[in-house]
Structure formats: C-alpha cells, structure tokens
Image (spheres, rainbow, N blue to C red):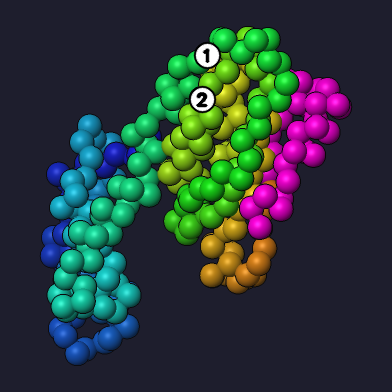
Amino acid sequence: EIPKRDWSSDVCSSDLGYDSPSLGEVAMHDIVRPLDRVCIRAQVPHAGTPTPADAELAVRDILRFIGEDPDREGLRETPARVVRALEEHFGGYGQNPEEMLETTFEETDGYDELVVLRGVPFFSHCEHHMAPIVGHAWVAYQPRERVVGISKLARVVDAYARRLQIQERLTAQIANAIDRVLKPVGVGVVIKASHHCMVTRGVQKAGTDLVTSRLLGSLRDDPVRRSEFFTLVDWRHVG
C-alpha cells in the first residue's frame, strides 16, 4: 500500500524560526533549501492521503529545488501533467492482480502441457530512485484442469509492474499470484529488464540488463519441464 501521511499536521519553515533568503542572495541555498516555499511534512500515520492538489504543490517544490521557475510558461501545466502521469505509472496500487485470474476455463480436452506467454513488455519504476525499469516478461504455467485467458497473464504483469518495485520481487509476485489462484502443476516467470537507475545515472552502464526467474512446482522440480521452459524463453523474441 502507498504510505499514508497526516497532511493536516504540516509544519512550515516560518513556524520553525528560519529566516528565508531573499532572491539574489545565495543561489545554491535557494536551490537546496528553499525554506520560504517548502513546508516540512510531519510523517504521522493518518487515514487520509494527499490530494492531487497536494501532489501538484510537491512537484512545484521539486521544480524550484532543481533551479527552475514553475511559473514560467513552459512549466505552468507541468505539475498537473506529472500528477496525471504518476496516476498512470502507479495505477497498479489500485488493482488486485489475483482477481484478474479468477475467470478460468475447463474445456481444454485434457491439455496439460506448458502454456507460455512470451516477451510481454512492461514498464515499472525502481523503489530506490523512482527511475524507470523497462523490460519484458515470460510467463508460463502447466495447467491442472483449467486455464486462464492469456490477456489476464499480461494484465497481472502490468498490475504488479505499475508500482514501485525491485525486479526480484516483481518476478516472485507474478509467479506466486498465478500459483495461488490457478493452483497449476507448475509456474515459471522470467524477466529481462533495463534499469535506468544504473543506465542514466550512477555507474551509467548503458546496454546492460538484469535477468531474474521464479520457478514453482514442476518447472522447478522436473528437469524436463524446466529445460523445456527455458528453451521456450527465446530472447530473440524481443529483439
């Protein structure tokens, strides 16, 4: 769940006795600690959550922090646009992935081989820097009497991806949800992704990717099924 704050207990810089620097004084001070504009949020648990208007004000503060003027023409609508983008990027918090798997089909004529959805594109954000994670997922399961619509597998990937994530947890969450709801013979998930937290910042290693996997049931314990799954995970499928 999204951490909840008590926004009613804000303490502003003026209440703390800080003297706000005037324009043109210490430029770096204005950027790093613009106390005349920013309120310190008291992180007290509360039943409410910030409103879109609260979030827009936070974006304006960030724009000032980096040295920009949020009131100039090109940035006037930016806070609202950023908030709408955040609602899209993190829409997974409002979704229940397991509910997406509840509608299943039993008329399979006894099909009991692997079902593999390959190269599902997804976008996420790392929880350490909120930088993009861009990748593909391979999702497989060996059914036990019932199957699920393949679009639901892709929706499960998106529902978990559209949250602050680390790739290891994302991989496990997808596999565990399929295992809990479908109760198949086996489950396999592989994710290959590029992390902008180390591509566009930090060590800046462009062209690198991270591969993670989660195997359950027959795909973990049966060497034949395991080998079959990894053979079907064809990296060339995504170019």
Residue 127 position within the rendered picture, expressed as x and y whole percent measured from the top left: 48, 50
Q: What span is colored magenta in the figure?
A: 212-239
Image quarter where the N terminus lies is: top left
Residue 119 position within the rendered picture, expressed as x and y whole percent measured from the top left: 61, 45
Q: Label 2, on which residue?
A: 149
- Image point 35% across, 41% down: which residue? 91
Report helix, strand or loop for mark 1: strand
Q: Is residue 32 left or right of residue 111?
A: left
Q: Is residue 228 above or below residue 184?
A: below
Residue 191 position within the rendered picture, expressed as x and y whole percent measured from the top left: 63, 44
The answer to whether mark 1 and mark 2 are in CB contact below 8 A is yes
Q: Label 1, on which residue?
A: 105
- Image point 15% across, 83% down: which residue? 22
Residue 59 position within the rendered picture, expressed as x and y whole percent measured from the top left: 25, 62
Q: Tell me which amino acid carries mark 1.
A: Phe
Q: Is residue 192 above or below residue 44?
A: below
Provide the major secondary structure of the magenta segment.
Answer: helix
Query: Marks 1 and 2, Cα distance to the nearest angstrom?
Result: 8 Å
Label located before the other in sequence (1 or 2): 1
Residue 128 visible, this orientation: no
Report helix, strand or loop for mark 2: loop
Residue 236 visible, this orientation: yes
Q: Tell me which amino acid carries mark 2.
A: Gly
- Image point 26% across, 42% down: which residue? 5
